[in-house]
Image (cartoon, rainbow, N blue to C red):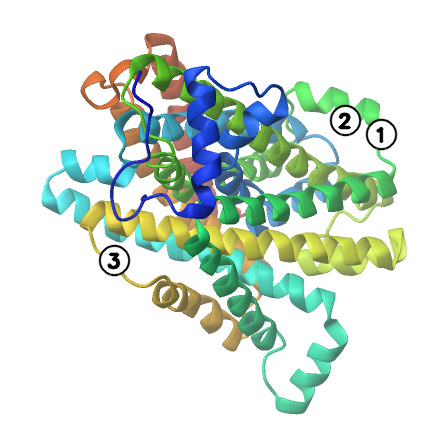
């Protein structure tokens, strides 16, 4: 049996640091490896962890903290449902890359008229910039909260906005992360997974310190409930901050050339391993999101502090309630979230540009361009949390343009071959897509014509 080999193109040619991972994956797929347990899974783990960082970005902090502070544990079920919906969409995206050897943007380019693909590219570039705005501001805010005193003194001495220097440093850190891609996909997967680990451990500590009501957590995690219009709006905001269009495009790009085979049995086996990757990575992301809400509920809501609506308020309020260590851990997790998701957002933008229009610009230039809106926000001294919420509205506008083509194209055997969706998968994905689109339309209506978020 011929061994599956990486896709032979300039973007996916295997580099020597990745060769042991690729060789091990091939042996496992063919059934010649003697590895068992975790060692058998490790060569296939990574793409979902990179995509999952979008599910714990600073936009999630804003919505989860507001939901927990205002309604306690009431909306935990929304996070669970949103994460399950995200798992379905990410699995379809990963499957497209594995089955077709092409990412979603490339498939859209192949099947859309020229005006359609250019319109999609422009729209997704706007979405990418909105995504990066939220993530980059989160990284800068997290760094500022970690080292407030020196940054405040510097701002007072120079008259510069307090977030300007943290933003510059966050930008430098992002460049460093992105250079790891030159060392092969494995290095980047490891560093992004490490960031997820920092966020997860931070919130595990936060939850333990906040001493939540585990009975209420178990109840509200599975029993759908609302408490008026405001809770519905926040629930939709949680969904909008969870299922992200750029993560859908990104995942197909991460799997399209990682391990390539065209043999039906190996394709199915490879996809099963990717499903495990998704379940673990997205499962961790879901638990982190639930931990954010639990911390806010057991700390702010339980103490009558139900107006905590911004990340800065949450940080400040944690000090008298749980002590300085809790606020430091919170800031550390926010920095890790913003820093890693900002780097991943840049990768997604590169994949979309190359896929839609076959253009390529150096990653450092793209990083500079997508940072510009964030620096404008900082120089104008706009409120970071309000800007995060506005960015989620832009993401809501772009989401249907990612999930509808994904469901349609993964249902086509001429594109997907043996991995084309079966009828049950198509029905489930279509229902989820319709629900996501309807809820996001409701979010947009409330934002512009209703009471807002």
Name the residue carrying label 3.
360
Residue depicted at x 35% and y 12%: 265
Q: Residues within 10 Å of mark 1 (few under 14, many from 20)?
A: few
Which quarter of the figure has residue 103? top left
Which of the two discs, 1 and 3, labels the residue nearer the N terminus? 1
Towards the viewer: 16 or 315: 16
Q: Is residue 24 visible?
A: yes
Of residues 270 and 330, which is closer to you in this image? Answer: 270
For residue 90, above or below residue 241: above
Query: In the rendering, at what x and y percent does residue 160 appear?
Result: 59, 84
Residue at 36% x, 17% y is 266
Q: Secondary structure at mark 2?
A: helix
- Please tell me the numbered disc located at residue 2: none
x, y (%) of residue 203? Answer: 74, 43
Q: Secondary structure at mark 1?
A: loop
Using residue 419 as the reference point, say whether residue 166 is left or right of it. Answer: right
Q: Which mark is residue 217?
A: 2
Q: Are marks 1 and 2 in contact (CB under 8 Å)?
A: yes
Residue bearing mark 1: 213
Rendered view: 276 above or below 307? above
Number of residue marks: 3
* Residue at 32%, 48% in the rendered image: 351
Q: Mark 2, mark 3: which one is toward the viewer?
A: 3
Residue 443 image point, x, y percent? 46, 40
Query: Could you tell me which secondary element the residue under label 3 belongs to?
Result: loop
Q: CA separation, marks 1 and 2?
A: 6 Å
Distance of mark 2 from mark 3, alpha carbons?
47 Å
């Amino acid at each position: 049996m011929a061994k599956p080999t990486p896709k032979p193109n300039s973007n996916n040619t295997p580099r020597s640091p990745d060769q042991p991972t690729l060789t091990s994956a091939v042996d496992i797929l063919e059934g010649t490896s003697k590895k068992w347990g975790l060692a058998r899974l490790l060569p296939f783990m990574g793409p979902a962890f990179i995509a999952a960082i979008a599910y714990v970005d600073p936009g999630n902090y804003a919505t989860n903290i507001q939901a927990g502070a205002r309604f306690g544990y009431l909306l935990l079920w929304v996070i669970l449902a949103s994460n399950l919906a995200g798992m379905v969409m990410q699995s379809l995206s990963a499957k497209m890359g594995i089955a077709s050897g092409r990412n979603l943007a490339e498939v859209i380019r192949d099947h859309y008229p020229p005006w359609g693909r250019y319109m999609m590219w422009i729209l997704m570039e706007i979405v990418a910039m909105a995504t990066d705005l939220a993530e980059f501001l989160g990284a800068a805010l997290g760094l500022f909260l970690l080292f407030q005193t020196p940054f405040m003194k510097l701002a007072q001495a120079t008259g510069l906005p307090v977030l300007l220097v943290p933003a510059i440093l966050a930008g430098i850190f992002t460049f460093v992360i992105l250079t790891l891609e030159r060392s092969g996909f494995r290095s980047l997967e490891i560093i992004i997974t490490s960031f997820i680990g920092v966020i997860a451990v931070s919130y595990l500590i936060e939850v333990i310190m906040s001493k939540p009501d585990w009975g209420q957590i178990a109840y509200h995690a599975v029993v759908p409930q609302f408490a008026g219009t405001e809770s519905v709006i926040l629930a939709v905001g949680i969904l909008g901050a969870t299922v992200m269009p750029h993560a859908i495009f990104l995942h197909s790009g991460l799997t399209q050339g990682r391990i390539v085979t065209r043999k039906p049995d190996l394709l199915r086996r490879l996809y099963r391993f990717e499903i495990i990757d998704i379940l673990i990575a997205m499962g961790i992301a879901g638990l982190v999101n639930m931990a954010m809400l639990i911390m806010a509920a057991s700390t702010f809501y339980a103490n009558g502090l139900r107006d905590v609506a911004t990340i800065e308020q949450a940080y400040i309020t944690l000090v008298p309630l749980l002590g300085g260590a809790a606020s430091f851990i919170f800031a550390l997790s926010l920095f890790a979230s913003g820093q890693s998701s900002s780097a991943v957002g840049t990768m997604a933008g590169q994949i979309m540009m190359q896929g839609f229009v076959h253009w390529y610009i150096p990653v450092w230039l793209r990083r500079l361009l997508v940072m510009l809106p964030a620096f404008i926000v900082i120089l104008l001294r706009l409120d970071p949390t309000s800007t995060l919420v506005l960015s989620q509205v832009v993401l809501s506008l772009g989401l249907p343009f990612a999930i509808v083509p994904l469901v349609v194209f993964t249902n086509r055997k001429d594109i997907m071959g043996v991995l084309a969706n079966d009828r049950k998968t198509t029905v489930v994905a279509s229902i989820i897509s319709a629900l996501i689109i309807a809820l996001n339309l409701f979010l947009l209506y409330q934002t512009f014509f209703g009471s807002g978020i």
